[in-house]
Image (cartoon, grey):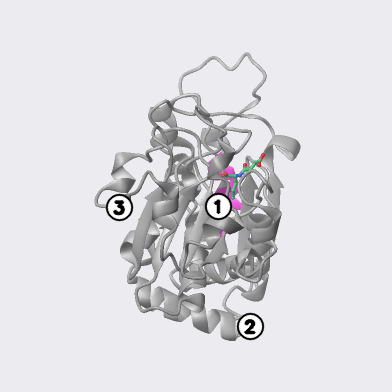
Amino acid sequence: MQRFLTPSDIGDLKQALKEAAEVKKNPFAHQHLGKNKTIVLIFFNSSLRTRLSTQKAATNLGMNVIVLDINKDGWQLETEFGVVMDGDKPEHIREAVPVIGQYCDIIGVRSFARFENKEEDYSERLLNQFIELSGRPVISMESATRHPLQAFADLFTIEEYRSAQRPKVVLTWAPHPKALPQAVPNSFVEWMKEADVDLTVTHPKGYELAPEFMEGVNVEYDQRKAFEGADFIYAKSWASFSEYGKVLSKDRSWTVDEEKMALTNDAKFMHCLPVRRNMVVSDAVIESSNSIVVQEAANRVVSAQTVLKRMLESL
Ligand code: SN0
């Protein structure tokens, strides 16, 4: 396994979920697999769960872990090609990435959408430079357009908590004070499409996700109608794709509250975290016994460890 960005990178999903269940049951079964192997985790953006869970996953496999918060501790990297480097960025990515590759066996990269240019973000230029220049397998720890470790953990969590064979899963947009990336909802949709679930996406007009992710996906603009009979409510805020990076609405009538949860089939509440309380979800819902956000976060170790195990096996 040379990269982890999309569900196709992990192959058969049923098999991957089975492996993940084994990893969860016996996390130390492969503690020698990573002996004398090093992973470097590079963060261009903030992280709590991704950093801790990926580090924990690697440690469970016996790996050495190096974490670099590159904006704080590294040189500012130039990513444009052919520029005269007379500004504030002392190092070019074309040297930095192959050098990082010399110090490790696997690389994890976190880099959010910058919202300066849609084509630039959706080309995944930064992540692809790591893939092309590092000579190492690369894991996305949330890139401009995807967050696959989150989506894999989400799917695993739904598998754990579902009572119906084919649960109704609803991804709902929610209000937020800031423009947030589409990475989490894009990956959520991308993974749910491959799974045995009945997926509905609900959001106000103007918040349609990129067509390349939404082909064949059911969209319901009436949030209450979407919630009817749902087994899982997955809330997330994202900025507009069509008016790229814009916050078109902060309408708190879209906040997930108890009244809306009452329309569901006693649905579990999910969110990738961090979550803005009483913007995205009410205190009452996130603190209810139907909220599985902490269990979902716990499964981030499971998804990361399953992916790392695959990568180590193919080194
Ligand atoms: C990120 C996002 O993609 O939405 C990471 C989620 C895993 N979330 C944020 O940046 C939240 C920032 C905030 O101010 O609430």
> Disc 1 on helix, strand or loop?
loop
Q: Residue at x 43, y 38 (%)?
A: 204
- Mark toward the viewer: 2 or 1: 1
- The amino acid type of the residue labelled 3 equals Asn
- Mark toward the viewer: 1 or 3: 3
Q: Which residues are magenta?
A: 97-109
Which one is earlier in the sequence, the residue at label 2 or at label 1?
2
Residue placed under numbered mark 3 in the picture: 218
Which one is earlier in the sequence, the residue at label 2 or at label 3?
2
Ligand 1 picture quarter: top right
**What separation in Å lies between label 2 and label 3 (alpha carbons)?**
40 Å
Residue placed under numbered mark 2 in the picture: 28
In reply to whether residue 284 is colored magenta, the answer given is no
Mark 2 surroundings within 10 Å by alpha-carbon count, few (fewer than 14), some (14 through 19), many (20 or more):
some
> Disc 3 on helix, strand or loop?
strand
Q: Residue at x 64, y 45 (%)?
A: 43
Measuring from the top left, give residue 172's x and y in whole percent.
47, 50
Residue placed under numbered mark 1 in the picture: 141
- The amino acid type of the residue labelled 1 equals Met
Measuring from the top left, give residue 274's x and y in whole percent.
66, 50
- The amino acid type of the residue labelled 2 equals Phe
Mark 1 surroundings within 10 Å by alpha-carbon count, few (fewer than 14), some (14 through 19), many (20 or more):
many
Q: Residue at x 46, y 24 (%)?
A: 81
- Mark toward the viewer: 2 or 3: 3
